Amino acid sequence: MILAGFLFAITYRYIIRQDRNPHLKSGAVLAFGLIRGLAQVEGQALTQRALVPALWMLAESLLVFAIARLVLDWALSRGWLQPFKSS
């Protein structure tokens, strides 16, 4: 999870650059959350009994990356991090 968070932080800073588009920010969270959550679910046989844990793993991934986005936005607003410059 630490590696996924690190890659998300770098990618997020590249995605937002100087743009204030909330759809880009939400899209990054959704993309990373879905990929991580679905990768965890992919290896399991989805029966009706395993559906709730699979949905929980997907929701957990989305929540973790949403929290990471909020922390990164907060750090960017405080000036602790700078978005990458667009050329």
Image (spheres, helix red, strand yellow):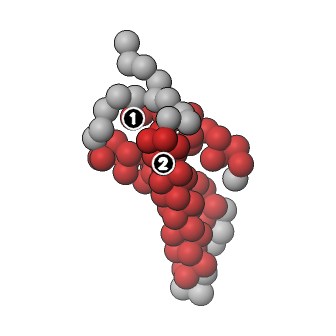
From the viewer's side, name the closer residue of 51 and 84.
84
> Is any part of residue 53 visible from this angle?
yes
| Position of residue 3 in the picture relative to residue 72 (left or right) | right
Q: Position of residue 45 (x, y in %)?
A: 63, 72
Q: Which residue is mark 1?
A: 16
From the viewer's side, name the closer residue of 46 and 28.
28
| Position of residue 39 in the picture relative to residue 69 (left or right) | right
Query: Which mark is first along the chain, 2 or 1?
Result: 1
From the viewer's side, name the closer residue of 38 and 57.
57
Q: Position of residue 39 (x, y in %)?
A: 60, 56
Secondary structure of residue under mark 1 = helix
Q: Position of residue 72 (x, y in %)?
A: 51, 45
Q: Amino acid at mark 1?
A: Ile
Count neighbours of disc 2 (C-alpha within 10 A) and say few if under 14, some if 14 to 19, many if 20 or more: few
Residue 7 to residue 58: above or below: above
> Is any part of residue 47 visible from this angle?
no
Q: Which part of the image, by quadrant, shows the C terminus?
A: top left
- Corner quadrant of residue 86: top left
The mark lying in front, picked from 1 and 2, is: 2
In the rendered structure, are the residues bearing label 1 and label 2 in contact, judged by CB atoms less than 8 Å apart?
no
Q: Amino acid at mark 2?
A: Trp
